[in-house]
Image (tube, helix red, strand yellow):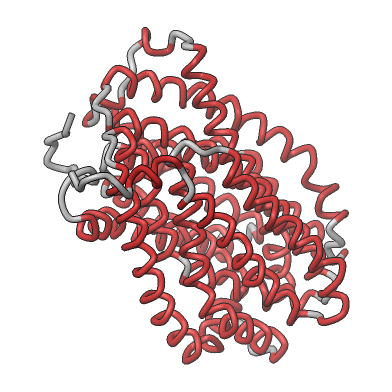
Amino acid sequence: MKNKNLFNIDVDLINGPILKSLLIFSIPLLISSVFQQLYSFFDTMIVGNYLGDSKLAAVGASTPIFELLIGFAIGIGNGLSIVAARSFGSKDKELLKKSVATSIVIGLVSSVIISILGLLTIKPILTVLNTPDHILNDSYRYIYWIALFTPVMFLYNLCAGLLRAIGNSFMPLVFLIISSLLNIVLDIFLISNLNMGIEGAAIATVIAQGVSVVLSIIYILKNEEILRPQKAHFTPDNQLYKDMLSQGLSMGFMSSIVSIGSVILQYGINGLGYLTVAGHISARKVYTLFNIPFLSMALSISTFVPQNIGAKKYKRIRDGLKIAFIYDLIMSAIVSILLLLFSRDLIRIISGSDNPIILDNGSLYLKIVGPFYAVLGILLQTRFALQGLGKKILPLISSVIELIGKILFVQIFIPKHGYLAVIFCEPVIWVVMTIQLLYSFYTNEYIRESRSEKVR
């Protein structure tokens, strides 16, 4: 089943040294994540520098809704690709093609529904979130275009997820680099040359993502026969549909619950004033950028675990998580030092502002959150591992813990302690979630069985 195409770099995650395999597989994911973040990073930076603090705050106020819409679509795509990875690990080519066909049907229908619901509810959600009146319309105009083209965002993530499922994390990187560079050019052209304002930033993101979808589909059709289903593979298989729909919806709802928590937290932040909103969104862009090494390893684990489940190599799964956790501790120490030294400069670059409220709040956020990246990395990798093991409810429980925690912070702590409570909200919740996830992972039947398994 190994594709020998010259342009593939297919990594064997089932055999050989675990650390080497995970690192080689995760490097393209890391670079891909960097370029994917450039979409929102340059939207934020160009909006802040060209259009000012008010428009920057408008993008910030709409970000949780963006994450809610796109997160559900991406979650479904990732969940569907887990089944494909399991089929690849068990060397069942026919089931793999069936899972691709099923993924296309479930994913397209789901993303269209999400898009329609998003378009109908954006304005009411922004109003309920207490979005300041003078940025409400700008926030709506920005997120409208994102919601309209949710299926485009889904299609790219599905194609990338399916390629990762067969060990190819390199080609999605190539397509993403091309589209990210296009996004930068379009951002500047639409905002500064055509004077399209905040809508130009959103349209640039959609067009660039669309290009990556077209490139991914062309590549799969020409080079990845294993991912090209035939007409017969689209014949409904009730058990497969049930399995994939439950896996996809589980991850989709998990992402949505997390995003709903972010929406609720944004409500508390909006009440602190638009300068605080601008400072926070700038800090979150930096936070997201530095989260990439941890998320990339988690995405590697999301392919590593189901492939090894398919191959029945359970001890390899436990050993892989142990290696990933050590990686988290080392990377967290490096990131913390960088943020202590350069946080204020990074906030200034992204926001394009010298306002002390924006700079002070954003810098303080990064300095405090830095050491907690280790906890977040362990959380992400354990959650993805559980999903790879086929557990659908346990990761959802962790998301519910996060939602409840954010509600408590918004209702109790943010009104009393202001932005400091915003900063500590997620790190405190991460600790609780990680304890629950680690317990669930190490009591899993496959992991318990791995203790007596010989290394294969």
Residue 404's spot in the image, x, y percent?
76, 57
Q: Is residue 103 above or below residue 415?
A: above
Q: Quadrant of residue 223?
A: top left
Residue 142's spot in the image, x, y percent?
68, 54
At x 37% / y 12%, what residue is drawn? 233
- Quarter of the picture containing the C terminus is top left
At x 47% / y 83%, what residue is drawn? 336
- Counting labels gives 0
Q: Is residue 114 above or below residue 419?
A: above
| Residue 285 in view (yes/no) | yes
Q: Is residue 60 above or below residue 183?
A: below
Q: Nearer the viewer, residue 366 or 136?
A: 366
Is 73 positioned to the left or the right of 327 in the image?
A: right
Residue 330's spot in the image, x, y percent?
36, 76
At x 67% / y 52%, what residue is drawn? 259
Q: Nearer the viewer, residue 367 or 220?
A: 367
Q: Quadrant of residue 33?
A: bottom left
Residue 228's spot in the image, x, y percent?
31, 22
Q: From this viewpoint, which residue is outermost toward the front? A: 452
- Quarter of the picture containing the N terminus is top left
At x 77% / y 46%, what residue is drawn? 122
Q: Nearer the viewer, residue 251 or 430?
A: 430
| Residue 10 in view (yes/no) | no
